[in-house]
Image: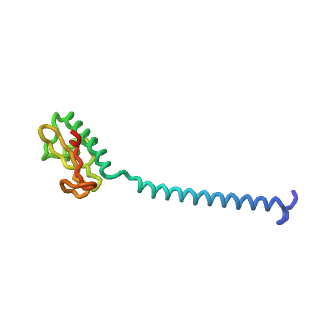
Amino acid sequence: MAHMSPGHPKLHWKAFLRDLLLSLATFLGVLALGFILLMLSVSVHFEPPKPDIVRHDLPNILNALRRYHAKTGRFPTTEEGLRALVRVQDLEQIPLDPWGNPYGYELREGQPRVWSLGADDAPGGEGEDADISSHEGR
């Protein structure tokens, strides 16, 4: 086998190819990291508005109440509240609204009503402070 000198063209080609592959791998790694960081920052900006989250949660809670009714033949009393759903394992935990407050519950005339008092956790209000109830639009 012939001995190749350091100035041999094959050695330069191998070194060039090695450097090219290292550069490409580094570039792709930086590009992937940048993409991940961009997606994380964009996902924070696309979180749905909190009132929309409440409007999504209320039907789910009402469905859990219907399952409770199917199992027990009745809805929880106002005093039992949503805690009753946890006791019969229709919910894993007492649900909180997007502002970290417990959803309100009452049983009136045999029908359940669930609500969030909004960001201010007080009756009334406008915008994010507005109350949202499962009886809206009825």
Report which quarter residue 43 is drawn in.
bottom left
Image quadrant occupied by the C terminus: top left
Locate residue 79 relative to residue 25 in the image: left or right: left
On the image, the x and y values in percent for residue 135 come to 21, 42
Give the mark count: 0
Q: Residue furthest bottom?
A: 6
On the image, the x and y values in percent for residue 52 come to 32, 48
Name the residue rendered at 36%, 51% in the picture: 48
Residue situated in front as seen by the camera: 61 or 21 = 61
Q: How is the image coloured?
A: rainbow
On the image, the x and y values in percent for residue 95 come to 26, 49
Locate residue 129 relative to residue 34 in the image: left or right: left
Q: Residue furthest right?
A: 2
Residue situated in front as seen by the camera: 92 or 79 = 79
Name the residue rendered at 26%, 52% in the picture: 96
On the image, the x and y values in percent for residue 104 come to 19, 49
Name the residue rendered at 23%, 58% in the picture: 120
Image quadrant occupied by the N terminus: bottom right
Locate residue 10 relative to residue 53 in the image: left or right: right
Name the residue rendered at 16%, 41% in the picture: 76
Report which quarter residue 2 is drawn in.
bottom right
